[in-house]
Image (cartoon, rainbow, N blue to C red):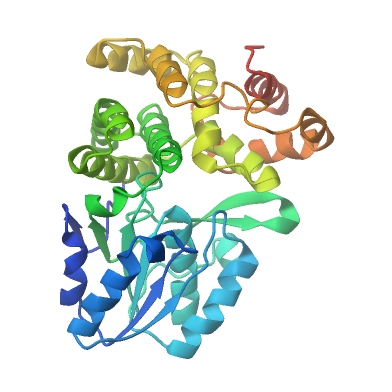
Amino acid sequence: MSSLKFCGDEIITGPGTLDAIKKIDGQRFFLVTGKSALFRNGTIKRAEGLLKESAKAYDILSGIGANPSVSDVEAGLIKMKDFDPDVVIAIGGGSVMDAAKVMTLMCEYPGLTIEAIKNGQAPEKRERIKLVAIPTTSGTASEVTRAAVITFPEENIKIGLKTKAFIPDLAILDGELALSMPNSVMVESGMDALTHGLEAYINKNADDFTKIMARGAVEGLLGHLRPSFENGDIESRQHVHNFSCLAGFAFQNAGLGMDHGIAHAFGGRFGTGHGLLNAIALPFVLEYNQRDRQVAEDLEKLSRLIGKNIIDEIKALNQSFGIPDSFQAAGIPEEHFKAHYEELLKNSLLGSTQRNPVKMDAEQMDKVLTSIYYGEKKF
C-alpha cells in the first residue's frame, strides 16, 4: 500500500505570482530569508510593500546561510517566538526554507526539540501557524517536501529531518525570482533537482505515480537546464522552477539514494555545495546502480526517451556547466579526505543511502567514494 502526499493546500505558479502574498489570510507575518542577495535585488522590499498594502504586521529574520545548523535554527527561533506570528513566509533557497520549517514547527510546539525531531518524535501537522514557501532557486523542492536538511556540527553530517508538518501550506513558484540567480547557483541547484528526479525514478519504492512524475521532471529539466544557463530568460527559468518542484513530488514519496547520502556526508564535513557534490557524484552513482537489473532497464528506457545515453548526457551537462569531474578537483584536499575517511565512509552509508536500489556496505561504498573523489572508476 502507498500513502502519497504531494503538497500542502495550494501551489501558485507563474511569473509575478509573488503578488499572491497580499491574499494570504493572517495578521502577523514573519519573513525568513538569507543574508543579502534578496535585499540587493529588491525582492524583500517588494514583499514588504505587499504586506504594507494589505496592512499586515510583519518582522524579518535574515542571515540564513547555506547549510543551516542546529544553532542557526535555535537562534532564529528566539526571534520568531518573540514576534509570535500566525504566518511564516520563507523566501529564498532551500537552506532558508528548511530552517524556516524547523523554526515554525518548534514555535508552534514550544516543548519540541531538534533532537526529538531527529529521533522521529515530531508532530505530523501544524494548526496555528501557516507556512508559505517561496523558492528563489530551482533545486531543493523544499517548498513541497516533508524534509528539512539541517547540519549537526558535532556529528559533521547533514541530516534530513522529516515530518508531514514540514510541508508548507502554500508554495509560490514565481520564475521572476529566479532571474537574478548567478549561473553558479543556477547550475548547482538545477543539478540537485535533476539528481532528485533520477534517484526517485530508479528507487525501488517508486510506484505508478512517482515514476511518471520523476521521469517527467528529468525529461523537463534536461530540456530546460541548458537554455536556463545560457540565456537566463524568464521562460526557461520558470520551466526549471516547475520541474524542480515536480521532482520534489516524486522524491518525497519514493525516496532518494546514495548520491544524496554521500553529498550529505561530504557537505556536513567540508561545507561544499550540496548541488555541486550531487552533480559530481551522479554519473558514478548511476553507473554503479546499473548492476541492478531493474535500474539498468529504467535508465535504458530513459535514454531512449531523451534520444541519448542518460549517463553520457549528465557528463556532458557537467562539462558544459564547468562542474569538476571529481571531489578532489572541486577543492577537497586529499589530506583532509584521507584524515576524515572513516567518518565520511560511515556517514555516507546513512540517510538516503538506506533507500539506494543497490544495498550498500562499507566495502562497496569504499569503492564508490574512492571513484568519486579521484574521478576514476574503481568498481
- Image position, residue 198 (x, y; %): 38, 29
Which residue is outermost to the front? 40
- Image position, residue 172 (x, y; %): 24, 59
Q: Is residue 80 left or right of residue 78?
A: left
- Image position, residue 241 (x, y; %): 27, 45
Residue nearer the viewer, 229 or 120? 229
Residue 97, by quadrant, is bottom left
* Residue at 34 percent of width and 18 percent of height: 298
Q: Is residue 164 visible?
A: no
* Residue at 41 percent of width and 35 percent of height: 187
Q: Is residue 155 left or right of residue 91?
A: right
- Quarter of the picture containing the C terminus is top right
Q: Is residue 227 left or right of residue 258?
A: left
Residue nearer the viewer, 188 or 151? 188
Quick check: 327 above or below 351? above
Q: Is residue 151 visible?
A: yes
Q: Is residue 103 left or right of residue 271?
A: left
Residue nearer the viewer, 216 or 360? 216
Quick check: 318 above or below 11? above
- Quarter of the picture containing the N terminus is top left
- Image position, residue 202 (x, y; %): 39, 26
Quick check: 243 above or below 379? below
